Image (spheres, helix red, strand yellow):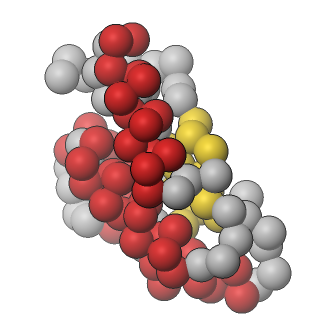
Amino acid sequence: MPDAYDPMSARLIEQAGFKAVQCSGYSFSLAACRKNEIDIGLTENLALTAAIIQAVAVPVMADGEDGFGGVEQIPSTIKGYVRIGAAGVNLEDQVLDDY
């Protein structure tokens, strides 16, 4: 699945014929000229992902990073992505930094 970092890139991916779009927190941070991937928190990630979802008719896979907190945060993180209409969420077994 190609990686979209904003609604325009998502539309280009869809118009190229791909059946789904992947979001990436790392790409979000690069596009926003942020120094680190962790500089895009859950609220901003949800907003960027929601804008991409609204821009295309194909399923969008969200990047839930490491859950944006400890294990106890994961249910709330997933609910946020479900609320905005993500088709799925990647959760990574990494620790980006302390929250």
- On the image, the x and y values in percent for residue 10 come to 56, 75
* Residue 79 visible from this viewpoint: yes
Q: Residue at x 38, y 33 (%)?
A: 77
Q: Residue at x 81, y 81 (%)?
A: 17
Instruction: Give whichever of 6, 80 is nearer the camera.
Output: 80
Residue lying at the far top of the rendered structure: 71
User: Going by the image, does 17 lie left or right of 55?
Assistant: right
Residue 88 picture quarter: top right
User: Going by the image, does 24 lie left or right of 21?
Assistant: left
Q: Residue at x 53, y 29 (%)?
A: 91
Is 29 above or below relative to 20? Answer: above
Is 93 above or below relative to 26? Answer: above
Which quarter of the image is occupied by the N terminus? bottom right
- On the image, the x and y values in percent for residue 96 come to 33, 25
Is 65 above or below relative to 85? Answer: above
Q: Residue at x 52, y 68 (%)?
A: 53
- On the image, the x and y values in percent for residue 13 come to 67, 77
Which quarter of the image is occupied by the C terminus? top left
* Residue 36 visible from this viewpoint: no
User: Going by the image, does 89 lie left or right of 46?
Assistant: right
- On the image, the x and y values in percent for residue 84 come to 44, 56
Is 63 above or below relative to 8? Answer: above
User: Going by the image, does 87 lie left or right of 86?
Assistant: right
> How many numbered marks, from 0 up?
0
